[in-house]
Image: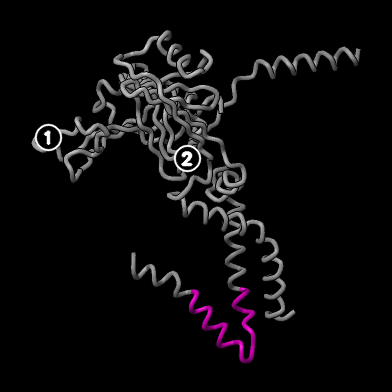
Amino acid sequence: MGLRKFSHALHRDIGYLCVGLTLIYALSGIAVNHLHHWNPNYKIESASAQIAPSDYRGVLSEERVLELLRKIGEPPVYENIFQPDPESLMVFVEGRVIQFHLPSGLVEYERAAPRFFWHAVNFLHLNHPKKAWTWIADLYAVGLILLALTGLLLLPRGRMRPRCIFLTLAGFLIPLIPLLLYY
Amino acid sequence: MKTLSVHTLLVLLCISLWAAPVSAQSFGQGLSLTETTPVSVLLDDPDAYVGQTVQIKGLVVEVCALRGCWMNIAGERPFESVHVKVDDYDMVFPLTARGKTAVVEGVWQKIVRENQFGFARTPLDPNKIPDPADRSTTDTFYQLRGLGAVVEGL
């Protein structure tokens, strides 16, 4: 088997092998690039309510916490509480955070639910599992290098060749221009 | 006899599952220290611990919503918490950790930050913005540079 034929076979097989991983990395890459526009990992549901403002400042007793929960129609049970300052209260209950601001009477609810698909692809892309996934990701990177190099060896002969060489060079320039501008 | 031993095994399995500790998720290097330093002790004399690796335990009250790169751990005393910072994507604390108890290890750091406006964080209440003459040009705060953590109940 000649080098050209071998490159073609290698390019084809690695290409098929890399389809799934490429989609994962590419989709997650787009998601992570736009973290400032949306949160791909969690869907955050929030709501607010209003209760009567209170003049009380300081450590809230158990009775006061339960009274605040009653005022917003919540059952008088919670998992944990925290007061970041004498005017505020955070109540943690069943995956939700309820924040009370005593001087204004503003109550804010928040629940964070993982977005299953995006959470999973980001989990893999950003190598949260570590361990064996690190090796798989390294092998994938090696696969991409081979894909690029074997692709170069597949340059067609004839009239198409200059066009392909031009596109390859343009591909090298794409990262160079931002480096010159922003680096 | 065979049936009895299978039943016994099933009962033992059920007991072991019931008695198993609540699930906990480990982050980064996990935990290596055996002694926990109360947050109040750190905050009472923060300079004494700068550069030391310490372990703290407390309620997770806030988590970075986008990158999971920091969380705030409540102290034992009211109104006190400690900021735990990790490198982006080195560890990713889930938003669902809020309200859970975490044990965190890290290096206690003192951060002195220059600020252009005389205060690092603009107070939400306009009445609390200090007069220009009273403003400091640096902002000092302490944080734990997280090396490892375990969040219980995740």
| B45 relative to B86 in the view: left or right | left
User: What is the chain letter for disc 2?
Assistant: B
Q: A150 or A122: which is nearer to us?
A: A122
x, y percentage for residue B94? 50, 36
Residue A52, x across and y down, in percent: 37, 18
Label 2 vs 1, first from the N-terminus: 2
Magenta stretch secondary structure, dominant: helix
- Observer-nearest of A3 and A88: A88
Can you see residue A87? yes
Residue A62: horizontal and vertical position, in percent? 42, 9
Neighbours of disc 1 within 10 Å: few (<14), some (14-19), many (20+) = few
Of B100 and B55, the residue lying toward us: B100
Q: Is residue A172 magenta?
A: no
Label 2 to label 1: alpha-carbon separation: 40 Å
Residue assigned mark 2: B91
Dot 1: chain letter: B
Instruction: Please give the residue where the numbered disc 1 appears in the rendered image.
Output: B131
Report whether A1 appears left or right of B127: right
State the image quarter where residue A90 is shown. top left
Please give left or right for residue A28 compared with residue B139 in the image. right
Q: Which residues are magenta?
A: A150-171
Image coordinates for residue B32, horizontal then vertical, percent: 46, 29
- Type of residue at label 2? Met
Q: Which numbered disc covers residue A119?
A: none
Which residue shows up at 57% across the image and 55% down it? A27
User: Disc 1 on helix, strand or loop?
Assistant: loop
Amino acid carrying mark 1 in the image: Asp
Dot 2: within a 10 Å radius of its alpha carbon, few (fewer than 14), some, or many (20 or more) residues? many
Residue pictured at 75% horizontal, 79% vertical: A1
